[in-house]
Structure formats: structure tokens, C-alpha cells
Amino acid sequence: MDREVESTKKGRDVGRDARAQTGDATPNRPSESFAAAMLVVACLCWAVFFSLGKNWQDAAHACPGGKLVASLTLLGIRTVIALAAFAIWKPRLFLRPNRREIGVGLFLGMFNCVGNVFQVWGLASTSPALSGFFTSLASLWVPILAFAWLRLPVARATWAGMALGIAGVAVLGIDLDMSWGIGFGDSLTVCSSLAFALFILALDRLGRTVNSFQLTFLLIAVTGLPPLFLAVGIAGGQGNLIPWLAWLVEVLQQPAVVRDVLLLTLLSTILATHLMNVYQPRVSASRAALIYLFEPVFAALLSIVVGHDSINRRLLLGGSLILCGNALVELRGWLRTVCGPMSGPANQAVDDGGKNFYPLSDP
């Protein structure tokens, strides 16, 4: 899942859920069902990232500096294209950020950047389906990190969901026919999910204090430009700067690679961001969280269709365990949305307002 475009995916502007339920609708406002359908389309756009990112890693096997430099290069190229599109589409975004927006964007972008680097680097050594399911663990880490960082109570359902998620990781990552332990790419992707969880938690605290569209623009820039500079630095430090530039020119002359990079930028970054910004505020936070569980499912299905993955028991069982764990964590918030708020401290969430994706306490 392409996490710089998930800047509002979980945790940002969650307070707008209440506004969406208090009758601020306009005559031409799309229904909540239509908004939910558009978020499903956004999930499909994000899911495309995993297979296209794997295509890039396969094409970049000869990159000077190895898989890490190839991963950093992809993040940088995609960001440059996205920023160029923003310069044409919304040029004022380059002039409008204030100091607070820049500060919040830099702080949040640090976590998002680390998560993206680990995620794309991990794709070089794991499959798109596994990457999608492992990345979705971020939803499970959030309440645990909130407990460790903010000392907020954790619901029993959350602990159960975490157990299911860990079991899913074990099923997906451990091949009994090979040596015990998960692979290097799988480990990198699990690390990326931790970075994304920190990003989500920080975003919940800070994202509501700045303009959401401006924040998305800044996150895209902060997430992708440092990896590009780092790729140049690593290549230069290894004495491979000229060979890296020559390789980059050569690989970008391949029509299939150019197609994939453009699709990554247009679908997983720009279109998904637009759909999220427009339609997420029009559904409840808990409903949006459950909709976003489609992302790893779509990622797995697309990967199977294009041939990166095949259907097997490990994929079905491990993926199901992780999805069930995520759903269990989100269940309480969904029930609160459907049945109405519950009284007492059991309704407390990350932001102590019960408007968050992550219900943390239990009766």
C-alpha cells in the first residue's frame, strides 16, 4: 500500500466524522454509499502499487548500488512526477504552506518516508500479496504504540486482534520446507508497518491542526525527495554515480517501466489522494477503516492475476488471520457508529474523543 498517499487514510481529520453526521450536507452532496464506493476505488488504486512496485524491482535488478538504491530511486522518480503534476494542477500549493504546516509535514513525513523506504525495499525480496498483508499490520500496531507512548488503555479485542495478526505473520512468513524464520523482505515490510503505525498515531495528534490538502502535498514531497537525494549520495559514495545515472536513463527507456512508473504516480499517488481527500470525510471513521481492509485483498488478487503470486493455503490462511485481526480491532468503532456511542470510559479512543479509528479500551 503506497503510504504517502495515505496521509489521511487513518487518523487525519477524524473530527470531521461528527460534522458529516450533523447535517452539513449540501443539495449536490454525494450520498455516503457513493462516498464509500469511491473509497473502495481508492483502495484499488493503492493496491496497484504492490504489483507495479514489484515490476520495478524486477526491472531494476542491475541497478548499481543494489536493491536499496533501486528502491530509493523509484520513490524519488515518482515524487518528482507527482510534484510536476501538482505544479500544473495546483501551483498555489508551492506558495501557500505556513511554518506550522511545513513543520508538521516534515515531522510526519519522516515516519512516512522511513515506512515507504522499508516497504519498497522489502518488495525486492517478497511478493506483492505478502507485502500487502504485512503492511496492513500497521492498524494493529497503532493501539499498542498508543498504550506505550500515551498510556492509553488497550481493549481486550485489540489484544486478540494483535494475536491473530501475529499468527498471520507466522503463517505467511514461515515456510516449513525452508529454514525457520521469515525472509528479509518480509522483515523489512513488517518494519515498514511499524513506521506507518507511528505515522498514523502522530497524524492523529497533528493532522487536524493543518490544512489537509496542503499536508498531503507536503507529505508527498517529504516522503519522496529525501530518498532521491539518498540514492544519489549512496551511488556517489560508492563511486557509482555515473553508472547509476546511465542505468537510470537506460531503464527509463523501457516502455513497460515508464508505463508502470506513470501508473504508480497517477493511480497510487494522485488519484487515490484525491478520492481520499474528497470522500473520506463523508463517511464515518470506523466505516472508512473497514473499507480500507480491502486494500491487501485487492493487492493479493492483482498479484495473483499478473503472476507474482499463486493461490496457496499459506496465503489464504495467513492473509485471513491478519484481516480478521484488523477487523477485530476496528469492530468496536464500527459498532459504536452503527449502534450509537456507549457511555463511560469504555468509549475512549486514541484522541479521547471516540472519533478515532482505534478504540482502545474495553468494558
Image (cartoon, rainbow, N blue to C red):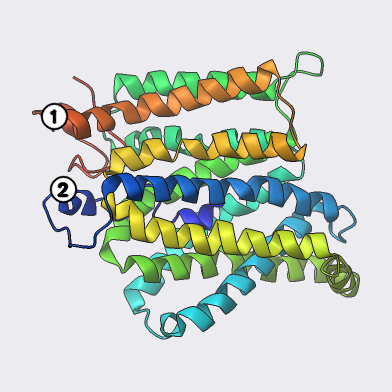
In the rendered view, would you say 35 is above or below 83? above
Quadrant in the rendering for residue 81: bottom right
Judge from the rendering whether residue 87 lies leftward or rightward of residue 250; answer left or right: left
| Front in this rendered view, residue 41 or 265 | 41
The reply to whether residue 119 is in sight is no
The reply to whether residue 56 is in sight is yes
Residue 334: % across, % down:
27, 31
Crowd around label 2: few <14 · some 14–19 · many ≥20 (10 Å): few
Crowd around label 1: few <14 · some 14–19 · many ≥20 (10 Å): few
Q: Which residue is mark 2?
A: 21
Disc number lying in front (1 or 2): 2
Quadrant in the rendering for residue 59: bottom right
Q: CA distance from mark 1 to mark 2?
A: 22 Å
Residue 132 bears which disc, if any?
Answer: none
Q: Quadrant of the C terminus?
A: top left
Amino acid carrying mark 1 in the image:
Pro
Judge from the rendering whether residue 166 lies leftward or rightward of residue 128; answer left or right: left
Between disc 1 and disc 2, whose residue precedes?
2
Residue 328: % across, % down:
37, 24
Judge from the rendering whether residue 83 lies leftward or rightward of residue 63; answer left or right: left
Q: Which residue is mark 1?
A: 345
In the rendered view, would you say 69 is above or below 164? below
Residue 320: % across, % down:
54, 22
Quadrant in the rendering for residue 297: top right
- Residue lying farthest to the top in this orientation: 176
| Front in this rendered view, residue 230 or 51 | 51
